[in-house]
Amino acid sequence: MYTLKIEGAFEAAHHVAGYPGKCARLHGHNWVVEAVVKGKELDELGMLIDFKVMKKELADVLERFDHRYLNELKPFADGLNPTAENLARIIFEELACRKVFERDSVLYAITVFESPKSSVTYTKD
Ligand SMILES: [Zn+2]
């Protein structure tokens, strides 16, 4: 089994409604997002998936969050808090359905770093 990891980033503001502390106030983060792909079968070049292709797909998914107020975007505008947990799941769901996963490769995990020492990982299981 091969495990491939790439990284993306975006800058955005949010607030966590109902949180009993500072995070209830409008503030921003430099969000870092790691995507992990797993698979056993390599292509004829010996690659699981091209790093360049995977980075572009992740960048495309993150584009709609960049320099935005996350609480105003779907699905957060409907009342879902834009926590690192919810972001990780939504980014996972949007990236997993992209048509870049060939052979037996699948998106395995998305990790969202709210800060260098605080992150959440979402996997499908
Ligand atoms: Zn925050």
Image (cartoon, rainbow, N blue to C red):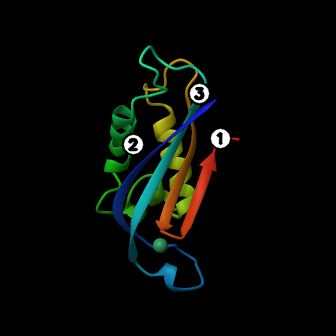
**Residue in the picture at 49% in, 31% down:** 97
Residue to which mark 2 is pinned: 58
Residue 124 percent across, percent down from the top left: 65, 41
**Residue in the picture at 41% in, 62% down:** 31
Q: Hey, which residue is sitting farthest bottom in the picture?
A: 21
> Mark 2 is on which residue type?
Leu
Task: Please rate how many residues cluster around mark 2, counting C-alpha atoms within 10 Å: few if below 14, some from 14 to 19, many from 20.
Answer: many
Q: Quadrant of the N terminus?
A: top right
**Residue in the picture at 46% in, 21% down:** 46
Q: Which mark is residue 124?
A: 1
Residue 85 percent across, percent down from the top left: 58, 59
Residue 32 percent across, percent down from the top left: 43, 59
Residue 49 percent across, percent down from the top left: 45, 28
Q: Quadrant of the C terminus?
A: top right
The answer to whether 22 is drawn above or below residue 82 in the figure is below
Real-space Cα separation, disc 2 to disc 1, in angstroms: 17 Å
Which of disc 3 and disc 1 is earlier in sequence? Answer: 3
Query: Which of label 1 and label 3 is nearer to you?
Result: 3
> Mark 3 is on which residue type?
Gly
Residue 80 shows in this picture: no
Contact check, label 2 and label 3, Cβ < 8 Å = no
Residue to which mark 3 is pinned: 39
- Closer to us: 122 or 44: 44
Query: Which of label 2 and label 3 is nearer to you?
Result: 3
Q: Hey, which residue is sitting farthest top in the picture?
A: 44
Residue 76 shows in this picture: yes
> Mark 1 is on which residue type?
Lys
Which of disc 3 and disc 2 is earlier in sequence? Answer: 3
- SS of the residue at dot 3? strand
Q: Hey, which residue is sitting farthest left in the picture?
A: 67
Q: Quadrant of residue 108?
A: top right
